[in-house]
Image (cartoon, rainbow, N blue to C red):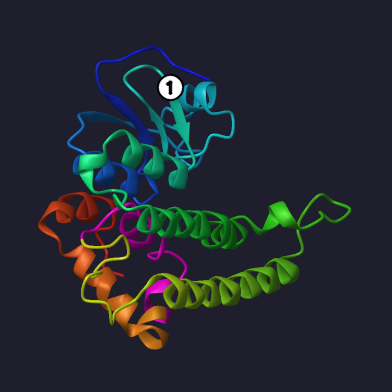
Amino acid sequence: MSAAPSDTWVLYGSDGSGSAAVELALRQAGQPYRIVRASTWEPDSARAELARINPLGQIPTLVAPGGEVLTESAAILAELGLRFPASGLLPADAAGRARVLRGLAFIAANCYAAIGVLDYPERWLEPTGDATVDEGRAAALRAGARARLHRLWEMFADQFHAPAEPARPWLSGREPGALDLLAGVVSRWSGARPHLAATRPALHALLLRLDALPAHTEVLGRHFPTPT
């Protein structure tokens, strides 16, 4: 799928969403972009325009200057890293790049998926006879999804964070990259940060260092004005 060519990247997203990670990546790659506010939960946003290029209506959706449409946060970050190798979004060495790509897929397939259940439990529950969802079952599903999500973040920390390696101070290696950006944004939801502070404090400290980077404070302050 492609859209009309432009002279800049066009990012469809909304404050407080996963589009924050892609915005940070575009900045790190030194790419000009403009933001189109769009989301399924904002009736006054450009959601009809978004649906024309991404029928799922998901954000972030990114349109390249050539008109190519990129969707799925992990895939967008990986593509930007491949297009702009000097950005540091992906490690230059094969082993490091493989680890980062695996980490991106882990967050997308596991953490993002659990958050989807928490936000929209009705999608996973069969309606009752009057087409409503039993609130008790929805609450139980949310509780199970939250516990699962927090356990997944523990597993992520154990597999992808090596605080004892001074040559790899960030999740992506020697410098913050795509995996740091995605983890830094997705960990802000559903109580993951407080849980990591209690169970995996080293990863939590890394995320706080990431938040405080001068290159990140303006974007993150706009997307997440309330500290997590």
Q: Spot the residue most to the left.
A: 214
Q: Nearer the viewer, residue 15 or 59?
A: 59
Give the percent coordinates (x, y) of residue 119.
56, 58
> Relative to 79, does residue 169 appear above or below in the rendering?
below
Task: Give the class, few, some or many, for how many residues have Cα within 10 Å of label 1's Cα (few <14, many ≥20).
Answer: some
Helix, strand or loop under label 1: loop
The amino acid type found where label 1 is placed reads Glu
Give the percent coordinates (x, y) of residue 86.
20, 41
Task: Give the residue pinned by disc 1.
Answer: 68
Prevailing secondary structure of the magenta residues: helix
Q: Is residue 185 magenta?
A: yes
Q: Spot the residue most to the front.
A: 94
Give the percent coordinates (x, y) of residue 213.
14, 61
State which quadrant residue 198 falls in. Answer: bottom left
Q: Is residue 25 visible?
A: yes
State which quadrant residue 141 falls in. Answer: bottom right
Q: Nearer the viewer, residue 98 or 113?
A: 98
Q: Which residues are drawn in magenta?
A: 175-195
> Relative to 126, does residue 44 appear above or below in the rendering?
above
The reply, left or right, for residue 2 in relation to residue 65 is right
Q: Spot the residue most to the right.
A: 129
Residue drawn at (48%, 36%) of the image: 71
Residue drawn at (73%, 71%) of the image: 136
> Relative to 17, does residue 148 appear above or below in the rendering?
below
